[in-house]
Amino acid sequence: MAGPGSARLQGDVSAFTTALRVLVNNPQFSDVTFVVGREQQKVFAHRCVLACRCQAFSGMLTQVPVGSQDSSSSVPPQGPFILGNVQPEVFLAVIEFLYTNSVTLNSHIVLEVLTSSVEYGLQDLCKLCVKFIKDTLSVEQVCEALQAAVTYGQTDLQQHCLAFIEGCTAAVVRTQGFRELSDVVLARVLRSDRLAVDELDLVQAVREWAHVSSAVLERPVPEVAALPVQELRLPLLAPSELMTLESHNQQDLLIPVESIVAAWRAHALRKGSGVPSRLCRPRHGTRPRDHHRHLEPHAK
C-alpha cells in the first residue's frame, strides 16, 4: 500500500498479460494438474494463481485436516484433480481467463464456458460470455442461448434472445434447439405478441416439440405439453383449420378438448367471450382471417 508521499504507478498491462499467458497450461513450475474430459487431457496450472483469482478453486486446492478448527492449518490435497464432465477446451478457456483476465471464445464452447463461469462464481467471465453470445447470435443457437439465459438468471440475455426469436420466428421453430427447449421456456416464448409466424405454423411446431419431449422424457404428449399449449391462440384459426386440428388432435391429444371447445365458442358467438384476451390477439406474423374482426381484443 502506498504511504504518504508515495504513488502507485501502472506499467504496461498488455506486457503483464502476455507474460502470464505463457504460463497457461505450462508444466514448467506447475504444482497442480487436472485431468479433464472424456479425453482425460492433462491441464497444468499454478495453485497460487487459481486460488487468488477464484474462491471455488481456493476451496478445491486447500484442505483442512479432519478435526481441525483452524483454517490456517489447511494443506494442499494431492492431485491430480479429475474433471470428467467438462470439455478440455472449455476448461482451458476458464484457465486462460484466470491468468489473463481475457478469454478466447467461439460459438461451439461459449455456452459451456458460461455454465462454468456460473459454477465457479466468475462474474466477469460470465459477462464476457454474454457479450459474445449477443454479438454472434444465430438462428441455430438462439434457443439454446435462451435456455441457458433462463437457467442462469441472465435477464438481459433472455430479452435479447427473445427479440431475436421474434424477428425470425419461422426459421427458429424449425431448429433442433427449438425442439429441445424446456416447457417453461417454450411457454415464455409463446406468450409473445411479436412472433413473426402464423398461429397454424406455431401449433405444428409445438406438436413436433411435444413429440420429441415425450420421447426424451418418456411421458405422454399431453403431459409434457400441458404448459405451452395454454399459450396457443386457437381462436385465431379459421373454422376449417380448427376442424383439421381436431382431427390431428385425436391421434396425440396434444391440446385439451376444452381449449378447442373454447375456440369453437368464439366462432359461434362471433367474439372472444370466455377466452383469455391474450389468446384473441393476433401476433405480428398472424395471417388475417375474416373472423378476426369479430374477436374482442379486450374480452375477459
Image (tube, rainbow, N blue to C red):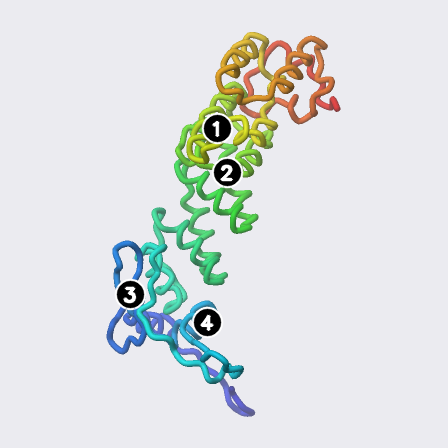
Disc 2 or 4, which lies upstream in sequence?
4
Do the CB atoms of the residues marked 2 and 1 lie less than 8 Å apart?
Answer: no
The kind of residue on which mark 1 rests is Ala
Where, quadrant-wise, is the C terminus in this rendering? top right
Residue that numbered label 4 is attached to: 59
3 or 2: tag closer to the N-terminus: 3
Nearest to viewer (mark 3 / mark 1): 1
Under tag 2, what secondary structure?
A: loop
Task: Tell which circle, 3 or 1, labels the residue nearer the N-terminal end.
Answer: 3
Apparent side of residue 266 relative to residue 120 in the rendered image (left or right) = right
Horizontal and vertical percent position of residue 156: 55, 48
Give yes or no for contact between labels 3 and 2 (Cβ–Cβ under 8 Å): no
In the figure, 76 relative to 244: above or below?
below
C-alpha span from label 2 to label 4: 33 Å
* Earlier residue among tags 4 and 1: 4
Q: Amino acid at mark 3?
A: Val
Q: Are marks 4 and 3 in contact (CB under 8 Å)?
A: no
From the viewer's side, name the closer residue of 36 and 194.
36
Marks 3/2: CA distance?
Answer: 34 Å
Disc 4/disc 1 C-alpha distance (Å): 42 Å
Q: Earlier in the sequence, mark 4 or mark 3?
A: 3
Tell me the distance, in whole angstroms, between the alpha carbons under discs 4 and 3.
Answer: 19 Å
Sort mark 3 into few (<14), some (14-19) or many (20+) by Cα contacts within 10 Å: many
Labelled disc at residue 182: 2
- Mark 2 or mark 1, which has the lower sequence index? 2
Q: Residue 245 in the image: x percent, y percent?
A: 53, 14
Q: Residue at x 50, y 80 (%)?
A: 67
Q: Tell me the residue that label 1 is attached to.
A: 210
Q: Which residue is mark 3?
A: 43
Q: Residues within 10 Å of mark 4 (few under 14, many from 20)?
A: few
